[in-house]
Amino acid sequence: MTPPAAPPPRGSALATVGRVIAGALSCAAGVVFLWITWLVVDSRFELTSADPHGYLLIFGTIIAIFTAIVLAAIVPLALAPRRRSVAYLVSLPLFLIVAIALVAMLVTA
């Protein structure tokens, strides 16, 4: 009688480390994105702005769009390989919506 076959490995240790690193980077980029986006929105809609020349609005928009690109690319890598395609299908349209909103706030200021 032969022993039962071992179950197939669920993932290598290197893949797990890569997913953990992607999760940590996405958390860091997410914090930066939320903070910069909050500053941009505050600069745009606050009546007594501490940003009279609009530099926060201009450069904050650029930084927020860059961090949104990083988030759209890295967040799906933190998920299981079978769910990455769905995560990309969700994250890329969300990035486009956020980028369009940020540019609209910049242009209409």
Image (spheres, rainbow, N blue to C red):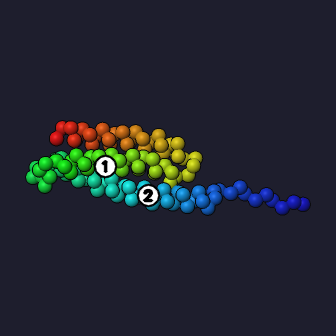
Q: Quadrant of residue 94?
A: top left
Q: Give the numbered dot on residue 64.
A: 1
Question: Between 80 and 35, which is closer to the camera in this rendering?
Answer: 35
Image quadrant occupied by the N terminus? bottom right
Image quadrant occupied by the C terminus? top left
Q: Residue furthest right?
A: 1
Mark 2 belongs to which amino acid? Leu
Mark 1 belongs to which amino acid? Ala
Q: Which secondary structure, mark 1?
A: helix
Q: What residue sits 37% from the left and 42% below the top? A: 95
Q: Give the numbered dot on residue 33.
A: none
**Dot 1 and dot 2 residues touching (CB under 8 Å):** no
Question: Between 93 and 49, which is closer to the camera in this rendering?
Answer: 49
Q: What residue sits 51% from the left and 51% below the top? A: 77
Q: What residue sits 45% from the left and 47% below the top? A: 73
Q: Which secondary structure, mark 2?
A: helix
Q: Residues within 10 Å of mark 1 (few under 14, many from 20)?
A: many
Residue 26 image point, x, y percent: 42, 55
Q: Which residue is mark 2?
A: 25
